[in-house]
Image (tube, coloured by chain):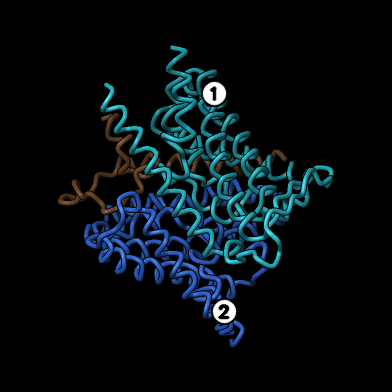
Chain colours: A cyan, B blue, C brown
Amino acid sequence: MNKQVWENFKAGFVKENPVFTLYLGMCSTLAISTSLNNALGMGVTVIIVLILSNTIISMMRKIIPNEIRIPVYIIIISTLVKSMELFIKAYAPTLNSALGIFIPLIVVNCIILGRAEAFANKHKVSESALDGLGMGLGYTFSLLLISIFRQVLGTGSLSLTNPFTEVVIFNIRIIPSDYVLSMFTQSVGAFITFALLAAGFAAINAQKKAKEIKNG
Amino acid sequence: MGNLITMCIAAVLINNIVLTQFLGICPFLGVSRNKESAIGMGLAVIFVIFGASILSYLLYYYVLEPMNIEYMNLISFILVIASFVQFTEMFIKKYSPVLYRSLGIYLPLITTNCVVLFVALANITSGYNFVEMMVYSLSVPTGFMLVLVIFSYIRERLAIAPVPKYFKGNPVALIVAALMAIAFSGLAGLV
Amino acid sequence: MIIAIFISLGLGALLAFAYYLNQKTPVPEGCENIEAACEGCKVSICSRNPSHREVE
């Protein structure tokens, strides 16, 4: 039982990575991932919403009538997202102006509704919360991959600021500013980065599957 | 009037919702395998966005704002959009099988489409009046449909082209989207 | 605040009602087996999602 739970948890990172393998939740991914700050902010928000929504839906799974479960999920998820949006507006205003309209758009992020439908309404509370954490970490991991790529190639430096106190945590210059490829901060670079990483993940998954078939 | 035309051109070509603002990528990659489904999806999106944003606009300005509960905008908009889609699908099922066959099947997919919620929210945050709101909510999905149809033509060719092994399917489609993004960014100085 | 809860529950009830009616409305004949050329199969609210088919 424990091994199954751990396998589920690990699946969110490469084998069932929500962004690169399942192609869910792409809307926010491409627009947000211009810098490490944005990626971490969005990722942590999605993790919190995922854990809370999975927990609440799992707790209520015996009470919700089966025919109307999706409308109920939508209400729960949109309430959670709105609360997170108000919290971010109050305590991290720079994050709010960077992420902008993408915080409310977490509601229609297919990952959250998809996990609620596929997992949380069939499993216990603790397993659902762990699954939420796993999927959220996988999503954050993908966001970080894309943003590190885009930020380093597009602006030449890697920086992180604490959104609550505006204190710069680190700011490293990797490529001199005369040699940056600014196309990576725009839509072109986002699509190209995403395509290359998606192909990379497809390659890794295919090789893993080939190894499994050879071994077992 | 000139203002409205500028807004329309800006929403369709310059700030294209898919290529510049990255919204609606999920159906963009999912429904663009052939021309017929792309056209069906595009028309369904135009209809849903137009109807749903009028309803959300009226709800916001006649119910939420007079009662000072603007913070309910997210929850009420998503519920209004989802209900509108469900009612539309039910209507089409009952009264027009032809229409159902061509575009009714995409309606449920549009509920979780980022574009609908984005247009509903943007109408409020940009402070449009009623006419501007209607023009905006017709132009944005037209831009979506334009890009989707063009993309489906390209993808039909791509399905039989020699693509490298791990790029088959979505990765090469994203590279094509990148090229389209560069092409459309050349229109940036139009207005 | 109370009105906000009422409005959200009211709209939620409207959505649940519409969703329920929609599930009950039969698909017109001839349309039952359309495999939409779409890959939105990860979207769970879509009525054509395989996860709904397993239930039947």
Q: Residues within 10 Å of mark 1 (few under 14, many from 20)?
A: some
What secondary structure is found at the residue carrying circle 1? Answer: helix
Say which residue label 1 marks. Answer: A130
Residue drawn at (74%, 50%), measured in percent from left and top?
A172
Would residue A64 be visible to someone looking at this image? no
Q: Position of residue A151 (x, y in %)?
A: 64, 55
Marker count (numbered): 2
Q: Position of residue A169 (x, y in %)?
A: 79, 43
The location of residue B180, given as percent across then percent down, is 44, 70
B12 left or right of A36 in image: left
Image quadrant holding the C terminus of chain B, namely bottom right
Does A66 sit left or right of C28 as displayed?
right
Q: Position of residue A9 (x, y in %)?
A: 49, 25
Q: Is residue A155 left or right of residue B117?
A: right
Q: Say which residue label 2 marks.
A: B188
* A114 w.r.t. B110: above or below: above
Is residue C56 placed above or below A41 in the rendered structure? above
Q: How busy is the neighbourhood of tag 2: few (under 14 within 10 Å), some, or many (20 plus)? A: few
A140 vs A109, nearest the viewer = A140
Residue type at mark 2 is Ala
Q: Nearer the viewer, residue A33 or B8?
A: A33
**Secondary structure of residue under mark 2:** loop
Asked if residue B191 is positioned above or below residue A78 in the image, the reply reads: below
Q: Quadrant of the N terminus of chain B?
A: bottom right
Q: CA distance from mark 1 to mark 2?
A: 46 Å
